[in-house]
Amino acid sequence: MFRNIDVNSEANLGRTKDRNKRLKTLLEDFNKPQLSMKPSLVSEDVIGNTYSYLIERFASDSGKKAGEFFTPLHVPAQL
């Protein structure tokens, strides 16, 4: 997620003082307990469900049906 970010870039993150403040705030935000993905705190597959949702949205935004390149885990049985 953060591979291509240059944390030393003045153009993107500002001068040293501002940059350090922004990075500190980012780290503090990601450390909040409500963002914890520990299995004991998450009742279902939040990451998997989020991925599925984004894939389905991407398909509809591109004008295709999600089934053209993505099959959901629960495919309804046809009678």
Image (tube, grey):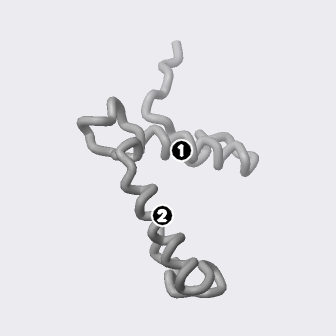
Query: Residue under circle 2?
Result: 26
Residue 65 location (% of width, % of height): 67, 40
The residue at 45%/69% (across/down) is 24
Task: Locate residue 2 relative to residue 57 in the image: left or right.
Answer: left
The residue at 29%/36% (across/down) is 41
Q: Marks 1 and 2, Cα distance to the nearest angstrom?
A: 33 Å
Q: Is residue 15 above or below residue 79?
A: below
30 and 47: which is toward the camera = 30
The residue sitting at the top extreme is 79
The residue at 72%/51% (across/down) is 62
Looking at the rendered image, the disc whose residue lies closer to the viewer, 1 or 2, is 2
| Residue type (three-letter) at the residue carrying disc 2 | Leu
The residue sitting at the left extreme is 40
Q: Residue 44 shows which numbered tag?
A: none
Mark 2 residue element: helix
Q: Which numbered disc, 1 or 2, marks the residue that appears first in the sequence?
A: 2
Task: Locate residue 64 relative to residue 27 in the image: left or right.
Answer: right
Mark 1 residue element: loop
Query: Residue under circle 1?
Result: 70
